Amino acid sequence: MFSKVKKYFYKKPTEIPNIDQIFKPLYIVLSLFGLFPYSIRFNNKRGVTIIKNSIYINSLCAVSHILLLLSFLVLHVQYVYDCIGDTVMTRELLTQMNYIVELVIFIIFCLSAYICAFKNRLMFVKIINKIANNTDPTNVERALKQFRNQMNFTISFLIAVFLLQILVNFTRDDSFWKMILVFITFTLPQMIQFTILAFYHMLILMLLVLLKNIRVHITNLAKDKIIIMDYFLKTESKVITLQNLESLYQKAFEIKKDINVAFQAPLLITTLQCFHTIVSESHIIYHGVVVERDFTLHPIINCSIWIIYQILKVQVMGRTGSLLKQEVLKIGQALHNIPTEKHDIRLLLEVQHFSSLILHQNDEITAFGLVTLDAALLSKIIASSAMYLTILVQFDRK
């Protein structure tokens, strides 16, 4: 068993990893949560194929998770109402409302994630195949190895987060039933959320590998001697068709739009949830430390960890969008470095047409046009949370 795990997390330095092989560890995690509706077979020649009738088992797994979450949501809400005034977490009306709203938002996210996963199940397979079949591994070997390292780090991070949440939850000073409720209604949805963000992040990184492949070909055009490598064909020529690269860029842009459509609903709810949780957990710390003054160290650590989790989620969403914009900018810069003085007007027109295509196509990732996922997202969320928390504190009775 260890050898099977090792072959996905460790490759020989001379071995060039394939995109679909790199994706397999995350695919296993997605399948455990029922977030990848199809079972797929990874082909050695790049690309994946759907296993026939596999959707039924995965659908059963997804439905089981949904029913479990909904059932424990009802039980947890009932528990909160029955225990009003027993704990600092539920003593004040605002704190109680925020606690329940946070529960509901997590469940809404999970429902939207499962609905979008099954609605876009064919799109996921199409995206993976498009990227794998249009990327030359020998041309972007370094990028693929970096991608593999990032995937290994992501899987390790998911495992570490899961273990940390179990440790924090089951060491709280509460009844065992409350620990079970928190685990099912908070820990499990949060792991589903982290897994969806990891899936989104990995698809964007796969797209970046394809864009880097395009940039490498364009960069070669700016050199005096160009070697065109097409598997077994090696030629030395100044004629490298920008039309093929432009067509490949259009495919990459279509993949970007597909990713945006498939994930915009979960990402929008995640943004709202992160904002609410930062405010809610900060208010709980304020209320327990400043107002009631009976907060122990464990609740402070628990709330602080949850705030850090939300900041990490926002950071991942913003950084991923920024990386995509930066790579598109680099492609444009490489395109303008192509010498056109000693060539006919046709090459100049192709460069101008390609540049216009990059300029007019929107490289931003948005959530229904309401939220732009870029580097400024984190600062916006923190600033809004601080302002809202200031207003919320003024409504405290004490």
Image (cartoon, rainbow, N blue to C red):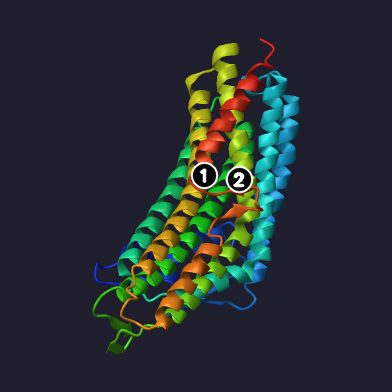
Residue at 44% across, 55% down: 323
Q: In which quarter of the image is residue 92?
A: top right
Q: Quadrant of residue 145?
A: bottom left
Q: What element carries label 1?
A: helix
Q: Residue 347 placed where, x, y %?
A: 40, 80
Provide the residue designation for mark 1: 313
Query: What is the crowding at mark 1: few (fewer than 14 residues within 10 Å), some, or many (at least 20)?
Result: many
- Above-or-below relation of 250 to 117: below
Tell me, yes or no, if residue 138 can be seen here: no
**Residue in front for this viewpoint, 313 or 347:** 347
> In the rendered picture of this protein, how many numbered marks are placed on residues?
2
Tell me, yes or no, if residue 352 can be seen here: yes
Q: Residue 149 placed where, x, y %?
A: 35, 58
Provide the residue designation for mark 2: 270
- Above-or-below relation of 265 to 11: above
Q: Residue 371 placed where, x, y %?
A: 61, 47
Q: Which of marks 1 and 2 is nearer the N terminus?
A: 2
- State yes or no: discs 1 and 2 in contact (Cβ < 8 Å): yes
Q: In which quarter of the image is the C terminus?
A: top right
Q: What type is the residue that disc 2 sits on? A: Thr
Horizontal relation, residue 227 to residue 315: left or right: left
